[in-house]
Image (spheres, rainbow, N blue to C red):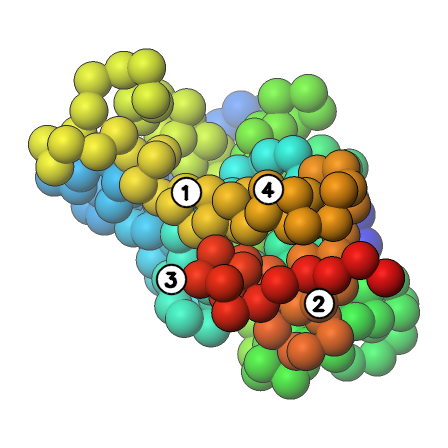
Amino acid sequence: MVVRPRDDPGDAPDGDPGPGRAGGGGPDPDGARAADAIARSVRGAEPGEVPGRLCEVAVELLPVIGASVSLRSEGMPVQLSASSEQAAQLAQIQATLGDGPCQSALEDGAPVLACDLTTGRDAGRWPVFAQQATEAGVRAVYAVPLGSGPVCVGTLDLYRDRPGGLTDRQLHMARVVAGVMTVALMALPHGDEPESPDGEDWLSGLATEHDEVYQAVGMIMAQLGVTADDALARLRADAFAHGRTALDVARDVIAHRTRFDRY
């Protein structure tokens, strides 16, 4: 379900249905609460720690059990951080399949609330992801874009262990966290800027796993004589066929434990 800025997010059994912000540009107590929690979380953090701490803030502020953040990239999203191993696994599943609420939020440039992956419309929209998500203990996923339209740089993905939607107030809170995360990620030093104290620029350090996938894609291209898109598709297909993540298969390719042969 794509939720535009003024839409009702649907079923919201867990929270106060009141609006997330006061009308007429008045005080925003929820935004202030989120800002306070974010400020406490990132105080004194090194650049590479910021995405993970913001994921933890999202779990603190919202009725979810996990959060992950990924950047838009050609082929596969770059997973930057997650609040738990379970959240990281869900992000990897979406990246491996090339499908799921995260991908839809990137395409739509608007929040996507998959309120029930066990049945109905959401389960039918992403059937393979829905099955794997529920097997991993997740029943609902909320994907909030970092930015919008042509400046959407990634997504904040929120995971919940039971079906249900977000109230207006909760969706507003998720947007506040995503907005701060967007600003923080765009402000952090990149490869052409000064390095962090440990000698590694923040993005290179966080995107190591993404680099492993594309190293494997290059090796598959050489083995099969195919394009990068076709090599990535073969990698994803092998991962899906064997119930693994694309990263797991990529590591086997790099270690020469797995080789792709032409049909």
Q: Which mark, residue 83?
A: 3
The CA span between labels 2 and 3 is 28 Å
Whole-percent x and y of residue 56? 34, 58
Q: Secondary structure at mark 2?
A: helix
Which is nearer the eye, 139 or 224? Answer: 224
What's the amino acid at mark 4?
Answer: Gly
Whole-percent x and y of residue 45? 17, 41
The CA span between labels 1 and 2 is 22 Å
User: What residue is rendered at 30% in x and 41% in y?
Assistant: 205
The residue that disc 4 covers is 218
The CA span between labels 3 and 4 is 31 Å
What's the amino acid at mark 3?
Answer: Ser
The residue that disc 2 covers is 238
* Mark before the other along the chain sequence, 2 or 3: 3
Q: Secondary structure at mark 4?
A: helix
Of marks 3 and 1, the one in the foreground: 1
* Mark before the other along the chain sequence, 3 or 4: 3
The CA span between labels 4 and 2 is 16 Å
Whole-percent x and y of residue 258? 58, 67
Q: Which mark, residue 207?
A: 1
Neighbor class of circle 2 (other Cα within 10 Å; few <14, some 14-19, many 20+) is: some
